[in-house]
Amino acid sequence: MSEQQTQNQPLVKANGHSGSNGKNGSHKNGANLSENSIYFKVAVPQSIVKRDGRIVPFEMDRIENALERCFTTLDIEPKTPVHDITIQVVNVVAAKYDLPTVEGVQDIVEMVLQAAGEYEAAKHYILYRAEHAKMRTKRPVPDTVRDAFAESDPYFPTQLQKFQFYDKYSRFNYDLGRRET
């Protein structure tokens, strides 16, 4: 079956049931996939919202590559094939979000890893995310942003008024990747 045909298939089986009872030779945790599995048919989202607010095409390969790097770093063989885990992640993302975010997809990757019994990989993935989130917060604020905020200081007698103004009236500027008034 071609990838295009696979993407257009419904996620629910014809009999109306959307899951299996874990039998028919599946893995003990039910994560092993077969062509009869609901997770075999992938509904891939078209776009994803990046952390900076840009909307870019959704790439299933990026999830699979991240999972492969996770298992390679740990030097363990996954109990469930990485491609099958990726398909499960994409199906959950497609069912949960019309327009997924990077953070939302990563939350689902953690959940699916744990559901597949890949606890060591899930822990590593969670710690890796936390480390990178910390690195993002430590990045310096660009001088242009500092200057823009400094320019507005004379117009606001208190920091609370400044906060309320920006909170209420600023809109996201996709060209600059930030909120502006």
Image (cartoon, rainbow, N blue to C red):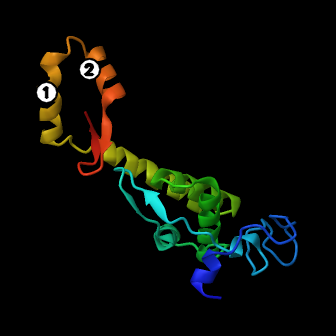
Label disc, if present, on residue 162 of the rendered structure: 2
Q: Where 163 sits versus 88, above or below?
A: above
Percent of width and height locating residue 23: 88, 72
- Give the structural element (helix, strand or loop) at label 1: helix
- How many residues crowd mark 2 within 10 Å: few (<14), some (14–19), many (20+)? some
Residue 40 drawn at (x, y percent)? 70, 76
Where does residue 116 sit, x and y in percent of width and height? 69, 64
Question: Residue at horizontal 39%, vertical 55%?
Answer: 50
Name the amino acid, label 1: Ala
Determine the residue positioned at 51% across, 55% down: 99
Residue ID for mark 1: 150
Q: Number of marks in the image?
A: 2
SS state under label 2:
helix
- Residue found 30% across the figure and 27% down from its top: 166
Occupied quadrant, residue 18:
bottom right
Q: Is residue 88 left or right of residue 123?
A: right
